[in-house]
Amino acid sequence: MIRFVAPTFAVVAISGLLTGCVSGEKTMADKSMQPCGYKPNCVSTQDERQKYTLSPFLLSSESDIESIKTAALTLPGAKLAEQEEDYLRIECTSRFLRFVDDLELRIDQGKLIVRSQSRLGYSDFGVNRARADALRAALANKGLLK
């Protein structure tokens, strides 16, 4: 009896753990308007807390989603993952360890809502803030910011 119960328990326990790891979702949820969580791996124009906040990105009259996309895709490891009328999700993959971060951009009333967050890990060691700063510079160089 014990020979049967122990392996069966192990199979059930492992399959339960694996099932808990699979979400079943094929797409990422749009978090562009949400503040960051409590891990230091995110920055956002929508967050008011000092270590997570970004200064507003005020758009010039020449800005549109296509010109913003062109500028954003110049960032290292950037690849377009999703696009809507006023929204972009860009996956940024690190060069060495191949970590994927999500850069979300949304045009809203003359401003660009920016949110950059690591998918894994606790800290990003400042990578997302550096990415947002690089995006700001790329947009400014193209005359897309006021």
Image (cartoon, rainbow, N blue to C red):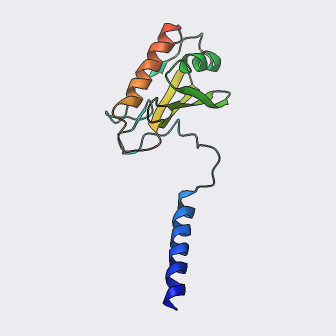
Farthest residue in the left direction? 50
User: Where residue 65 appears, x then y in whole percent?
Assistant: 63, 20
User: Where residue 63 appears, x then y in whole percent?
Assistant: 59, 14
Residue at 44 percent of width and 14 percent of height: 137
Q: Quadrant of residue 45?
A: top left
Vertical position of residue 69 compared to residue 52: above or below: above
Query: How many marks can you see?
Result: 0
Report if residue 124 is visible in the image.
yes
Left of 32 or right of it: where is 41? Answer: left
Q: Nearer the viewer, residue 20 or 42?
A: 20
Farthest residue in the bottom direction? 1
Q: Quadrant of residue 72?
A: top right
Q: Nearer the viewer, residue 78 or 87?
A: 78
User: Where residue 78 appears, x then y in whole percent?
Assistant: 54, 26
Farthest residue in the right direction? 85
Q: Nearer the viewer, residue 144 or 129?
A: 129
Left of 55 or right of it: where is 98? Answer: right
Q: Quadrant of residue 22?
A: bottom right
Residue at 46 percent of width and 29 percent of height: 95
Q: Nearer the viewer, residue 1 or 125?
A: 1
Residue at 58 percent of width and 18 percent of height: 68
Vertical position of residue 73 compared to residue 127: above or below: above
User: Where residue 117 appears, x then y in whole percent?
Assistant: 45, 36
Left of 84 or right of it: where is 12? Answer: left
Report if residue 146 is visible in the image.
no
